Image (tube, helix red, strand yellow):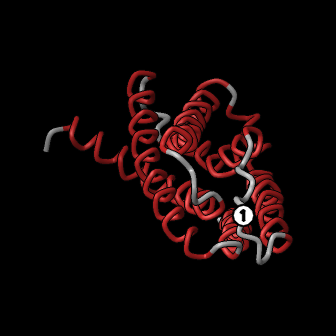
Amino acid sequence: MDRTFVFFLQSALLGVGLAMDAFSVSLANGLNEPGMRAPRMCGIAGVFAGFQALMPMIGWFLVHEAVQHFKKFEPFVPWIALILLAFIGGKMLYEGIKNRGSEAEKPAVGFWGLMVQGVATSIDALSVGFTIAEYDFIHALACALVIAAVTFVICMVGLVLGKKVGTKLSWKASVLGGIILIGIGIEIFLSGLLS
C-alpha cells in the first residue's frame, strides 16, 4: 500500500477520533442557536478545526523541544477540560432553565465562550504530538491540517443536526446542550484519570 495513502488515512482516522468532543459541542451549539446562519457555522467549525490542528503541533513541538515541561502539565489536562466545559455547560443549562417557556432566541455563544470551547475540546490533542513525534515538521503539519479538515466537516454535521433538533425542542435544547457539555467534560476528566 502506498505510504502517502496510509499517512493520510491514519491522519484522517486520528482526526475522527479527536473531533468527537468537538462534534458533541457543535451539536450543543446548534441546539442552543437553531437560527444560526452558514457564516457563523463555518466560523464555529473553523475555530474547532483550528484548535484541533494547533494542539497536535504544540504537542509535537513540546516533544522536540520541551518534553519535560509538558510531562509536568499532563496531569492537569483532564481537570482543565472538566472545569472549562462544566462552566460553559452550566451556563447553558442555567440559561435554558431561566428561559423555560420562552420562545425568544437564546443568546449565541460569544467569541470568548467559543475560544474556551475550542481549548476544552482540543486540549487532549496535545498528546497527539507524542504519537507524531517521529514525523518531520512538514509531515506533522500535514497531519495537523488533515485533522483540521476532518474536524471542520464533523463539526459542520454536528451544527446542522443540532439546529434541526433545536428548532423542535425550544428552551429544552439549551438545557440538553448544557448537559451534553457537562457530560463531555466529565468523560474527558474520567478518561484522563483512568489513563
Where on the picture, by quarter, is residue 146? top left
Q: Residue at x 40, y 48 (%)?
A: 153
Left or right? Give the position of 24 relative to 75: left
Q: Is residue 190 visible?
A: no
Relative to 141, residue 6 above or below: below
Q: Position of residue 80 (x, y in %)?
A: 79, 52
Relative to 53, residue 156 above or below: below
- The residue under label 1 is which amino acid type? Gly
Between 71 and 20, the one nearer to me in the picture: 20
Q: Position of residue 190 (x, y in %)?
A: 71, 70
Q: Residue at x 73, y 63 (%)?
A: 104
Between 125 and 137, the one nearer to me in the picture: 125
Q: Position of residue 14 (x, y in %)?
A: 42, 50
Quarter of the N terminus within the rendering? top left
Left or right? Give the position of 99 relative to 126: right
Relative to 182, residue 8 above or below: above
Where on the picture, by quarter, is residue 72? top right
Q: How many marks?
A: 1
Between 188 and 180, the one nearer to me in the picture: 180
Q: Is residue 5 visible?
A: yes
Left or right? Give the position of 17 relative to 98: left
Between 55 and 129, the one nearer to me in the picture: 55
Quarter of the C terminus within the rendering? bottom right
How crowded pointer 1 is (Cα within 10 Å; few <14, some 14-19, many 20+) is rated as many
